[in-house]
Amino acid sequence: MMSNAVISVFGGLAWSAVLAGPAASQALQKPALSVSTNDGRFTGYSAALPLDLSTDTESAKLTAKVAGTAENPTYDLDLNLVQKPDDVRTGKRALALGASWNDREARLRSSMSKAFGFGLLPRANFVSVSMDVNARQDIAAPGRIPVARANVRSSLTLEGRPIGSIAVGGGTLGDEGVDLALTRPFDIPAEFSVSLRAVASNGEAWRVQDSRFMVKLVKANW
């Protein structure tokens, strides 16, 4: 069972590399395989095969993975694209797409980010904007609306140091949220963040469901 699960994910990729010749073979990276046991009994495994699909302008990596048990494996695909730095573009773009599925559920995830430089040192002073979207669908209930959530985040970096960020998110469950974070202000080795979550259900007015204030110590110098 385990060998069949591994072959079903990696077999097509391996055959395509062999048939495509040396160029495709160079894209294949070192696979990772791990097996877990408990009291001498096999309990699970994880096998991942990364492919380097980078070009002159983009760093691209595709990773196929299968993990779990022989009876219930989980398949996973991840694609990460990052713009390579050059003398023309000061901002950096990144895109990540992923999917995973098993007998119980299927998940989709995506993340996009863009950095905008400003001032005399745009590589050290920039504003970064990112958006993350995650969705989950139960296999046993295909007609049900997928559970999804989207989050938009903006952060500020000055002289190479992160200053602060703000994030706004919402989802199909009706919860809306705002996160505020102030990172190491005035050379204080700590990160301060405020998180608010609001919800409106059954036609009621918006009410705060969860509010948090957190302080995280950060060691600036090692």
Image (tube, rainbow, N blue to C red):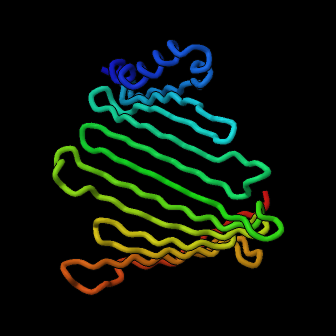
Q: Indicate the position of residue 21 as horizontal and vertical percent values.
A: 57, 13
Determine whether, in the image, residue 11 is placed left or right of residue 155.
left
What quarter of the picture does the C terminus occupy? bottom right
Check the image and report above or below for 185 versus 173.
below
Q: Residue at x 62, y 21 (%)?
A: 26
| Residue with the most extreme bottom position | 205
Q: Nearer the viewer, residue 202 or 86?
A: 86
Total label count? Answer: 0
Q: Nearer the viewer, residue 168 or 199?
A: 168
Q: Nearer the viewer, residue 220 or 74?
A: 74
Q: Residue at x 33, y 72 (%)?
A: 175
Determine whether, in the image, residue 97 is placed left or right of residue 22.
left
Q: Indicate the position of residue 92 as horizontal and vertical percent values.
A: 66, 55
Q: Residue at x 29, y 58 (%)?
A: 147
What quarter of the picture does the N terminus occupy? top left
Residue 190 at least partly seen: no
| Residue with the most extreme right position | 120
Q: Indicate the position of residue 73 as horizontal and vertical percent values.
A: 32, 32
Q: Indicate the position of residue 34 as horizontal and vertical percent values.
A: 48, 27
User: Which image quarter: residue 45?
Assistant: top left
Q: Residue at x 36, y 82 (%)?
A: 208
| Residue with the most extreme front position | 88
